[in-house]
Image (cartoon, helix red, strand yellow):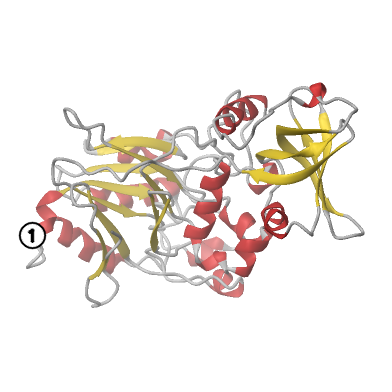
Amino acid sequence: FRQRFIDIRKILQEHSELDNLVSVNKISRSNQRISIIGIVYSKKITKNNNILLEVEDLTGKIKVLVTQNKKEVYQKAEDITLDSIIGFKGSGNNDILFVNEIVFPDAAIPERKKSPVEENILFISDLHIGSKNFMAKNFLKFIDYLNGKVPDTPEVEKIKYLFIVGDLIGGVGVYPNQEKELKIKDLEAQYSRVAELLNKIRKDIKIIILPGNHDCVRLMEPQPVLDEKYAWPLYNLKNVILTGNPSLINVGAKENFPGFNILGYHGFSYHYYANNIPSLISEGASNSPDKIMKYLLKNRHLAPTYTSIQHAPLENDELVIKNVPDIFVSGHTHKNSVSYYNNVLIISNSCWEEIMPYQEKMGFESDYCKVTMFNLKTRKVKILDFYEDENKEDVDQN
C-alpha cells in the first residue's frame, strides 16, 4: 500500500489543479485553501446525504466532506472506491476538509501511434478448452483463417501477433460441480489439447499468453506465468511467449519507432466494480466491460479496492498502471467491445465457450468467437466473426 501510494502520488503531483499541496500532518488549525493526496480509508453518507470520506497519507488521516449542493463534485465522489488514491482540493483545517474539486490520477496519451510497417495483431481470450461447451469447430475455423485457408483474406499474411488474455482451459474445480461440464477432466490433458490446437497455427505468428482465473496459477493477483508442472505442453511451443497477469508487453518496435505498449489484464476484478460503482451500475457495465476498463484507467489501478480481488502481499503493487499503455486488453466478461479513452485503445474479448447454466442464472450475456484485429500502421480495427457462418464486419474506430 505504501509503494502504491508513492507511485500514484507521483502521477497526481503532475496535475496542476492540485495547488497548495500539503501532507496531512502539515494542515494547521486555522482555515486555509489547500490540496491533499490521500488513499481512501472509509466512505459513508451522512444524515444530510453528504459524502464523508476518511483519507490517509503517509503522515496522518483527515476527514473529507463532499456536500450534495456541489453536484458535479458529488457525482465524482459517488464513484470513489475504497483504497483508491485521489487528489482533493478545498478549504478547511486539520479537523475536516470541505472539497471543491476531486482529481483522479487518470490516464491519457498525447497521440495515437502508427507503425511505419504494416503488421496485424489479434486478440482473443476465454477459450475454456476442456469444457463440454468449448466451440472446437469455430476455433478450428479460426486456425484455418490464420493459416491462409480462407479465400479473399489477404490481410492474413500481415498477422504477426496473437494475444490470448487468460482462461485457456476450463480448469478443474473452479466452481461447484464443474466436473459434470468438463469433457477433459485433467489439467495436463487440457493443456495438451491447447498445445495441440496452437501448434496448428503457422509458426511466424508470435502467440503471447496471459493466465486467467481458470488456469493453473494462484487466484491471488498478480498471477505468475502458467505453472510448468501442468502447462508443460505449451513450454514446448517455440512461438509461444508466456507472461504473468497483468503484463505490459511491447510489440512492433522498429528502428526509430518505439512500438506499442499493450497492457494485458484478464479482468477478474471487473464484476466487483460493475456491481459497486453507482455510474457503472446505472450504465449496465456488467455487459459493457469497456466502461469498467475506462474507470480503472481513471484510477490508474486494475483493482484499487483491496477486497475486489485476492491480492498477493508483495513489496510492489503490480496492478498500478504506472505507464499509460497504447492498448488495454482484457477478457473474463465474455463480452466483445472496442473503444477509445484519452487515445488509449480499449479491447474486451468474447469467449469460445457456450454459456453455462450458472452464468445464465447470474444474468451473464456472452459474445462468441469474435476476434479483434488491429493494424499497427493504419490503426484500422476489424472484428472477425467465427461464430457459425456469420460474415466478418468492419468497425471504424478512427
Q: Nearer the viewer, residue 190 or 217?
A: 217
Residue 6 appears in which quarter of the rendering?
top right
> Where does the image place residue 261, in percent across and percent down from the top left?
34, 38
> Is the residue marked by circle 1 packed among few (<14), some (14-19), or many (20+) residues within 10 Å?
few
> Is residue 172 at least partly visible in the picture?
no
Q: How many marks?
A: 1
Q: Is residue 82 left or right of residue 141?
A: right
> Where does the image place residue 209, in percent across and percent down from the top left?
35, 43
Relative height, residue 19 to residue 265 (above, below): above
Pick out the residue farthest to the bottom: 389
Residue 8 appears in which quarter of the rendering?
top right
Q: Which residue is mark 1?
A: 154
Kind of residue sitting beneath label 1: Pro
Instruction: Name the residue rendered at 45%, 56% in the picture.
Output: 170
Instruction: Name the residue rendered at 47%, 58% in the picture.
Output: 290
Mark 1 secondary-structure assignment: helix
Which quadrant would the C terminus be assigned to in this image? bottom left
> Where does the image place residue 316, in percent across and percent down from the top left?
57, 25
Q: Nearer the viewer, residue 374 or 390?
A: 374
Q: Is residue 254 left or right of residue 28?
A: left
Instruction: Name the residue rendered at 90%, 60% in the picture.
Output: 48
> Where does the image place residue 356, in percent across and percent down from the top left?
51, 70
Q: Nearer the viewer, residue 237 or 327?
A: 327
Q: Is residue 2 left or right of residue 350?
A: right
Residue 97 appears in which quarter of the rendering?
top right
Q: Nearer the viewer, residue 18 or 334?
A: 18
> Is residue 159 at least partly visible in the picture?
yes
Which quadrant would the N terminus be assigned to in this image? top right
Q: Is residue 226 left or right of residue 18?
A: left
